[in-house]
Amino acid sequence: MITIIILIALFSYRQNIFSTTSLPLDDEQQGLNEQITIHFSHVVAENTPKGIAAEKFKELVEEKSDGKVVVQLYPNGMLYNDENELDALRENKIQMIAPTISKVTKTLPNWQVLDLPFIIEDNNQLKKVLKGETSKSLLLELDSINVKGLTLWNNGFKQIAATTPIIEVMDFKDKRVRMMTSDILHEQFELLGAKPIATSFGDVYSGLKQNIVDAQENTISNIYSKQFHTMESHITLSNHGILAYAVMMNEDFWNSLDEDIQKIITDSLTQMQSWQFDRAEQFNDENLTYLKAIPSVEIYELNVQNKIEWKEKLSPIYSHYEKNINGHYLDDLINEIKQID
């Protein structure tokens, strides 16, 4: 037995089994060890403005980095919903998200300036505001919560989808309207006479099936892609508000990246920004065409008098933001829009 033990020890020594020196890695192993993975979670379908933007971002970053950076996408709320994704990002459980601007307002109330109704009137204004100084200032505020604000993506204007027609202000009376968590959005629907109900995006479909809500505000692309029109077949093209996404990254993770990797990320986002804006507009136009072709769906438009009545009813909301949140941001946004015209 002793002889066997001695022979095993001698063999092990010659084969260097007990050596603490790491074995050399081949090129493929070395590359895997150096690879950086960005886990990017979002809550919408792939065939939406945000879904295709995430795919485009992944494509550009992986191409520019020669595969050194891998972007792993988790759509449709696979990992987190829109109520808990920001907390997950701040804890670095995921590295990147793109929540709606409304979802940021609970943590950073100034962001509600972009939730104010009827401030932005058309796609030209919308594109320029999302690239403008007010938006840049809002993105910088994310530094205070350990988040790196990168850019804003567009999903166009919000419409009203409901189980019964909502055209005049009186049609809102006592309607249970699903909204995103935002004090300004809550105030908006209360001023219109509705009963606002805040739920996550992932709960909207079940809420409709269970008859918990009667209506919602959303973009055409979200209404169509999530099949909300099958239960809310009355769609009013109100264009009363905007839906945009704040593209952000965990700040500690961002700071851990080399400058060249950071540049690849920012260059990719800059390169795709105009493309993203145009594709969002195209998506909403195409999806509206599809909805108009469905016999069971009714599409309504606000006439001039309807719009005047909506605006009059909502007029106190601007002084509410100015007095209770931040009048400076409201003034800046209005001045910015005036310069666009």
Image (cartoon, helix red, strand yellow):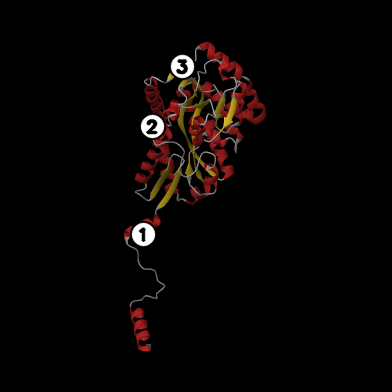
Q: Secondary structure at mark 1?
A: helix
The residue lying furthest to the front in this view is: 210
Residues 41 and 109: in front is 41
What percent of the width, then of the height, locates residue 252?
52, 50
> Which residue corresponds to the image point at 35% horizontal and 63% vertical from the top-left?
25
In the image, 57 versus 162, the foreground residue is 162
- Disc 3/disc 1 C-alpha distance (Å): 59 Å
Q: Is residue 220 left or right of residue 25?
A: right
> Where does residue 55 sit, x and y in percent of width and height?
38, 39
Disc 1 residue type (three-letter): Gln
* Few, some or many residues within 10 Å of mark 3 (<14, 14–19, 20+): some
- The quadrant in which the N terminus is found is bottom left
Between circles 2 and 3, the one closer to the viewer is: 3
The quadrant where residue 263 appears: top left
Q: Earlier in the sequence, mark 3 or mark 1?
A: 1
Q: Farthest residue toward the right?
A: 323
Q: Position of residue 36 (x, y in %)?
A: 42, 51
Which of 74/172 is in front?
172
Q: Are marks 3 and 1 in contact (CB under 8 Å)?
A: no
Q: Looking at the picture, which amino acid does disc 3 mark? A: Tyr
Of the image marks 2 and 1, the number of the one nearer the N terminus:
1
Outermost top residue:
305
Q: Residue at x 34, y 84 (%)?
A: 7
In the picture of the structure, the residue carrying the numbered disc 2 is: 275
| Residue hosting label 3 | 300
- In three-dimensional space, the C-alpha distance between marks 2 and 3, rounded to whole angstroms, equals 29 Å
Write down the residue under mark 1: 30
Which of the two residues, 192 or 262, is positioned nearer the viewer here? 192
Q: Is residue 188 visible?
A: no
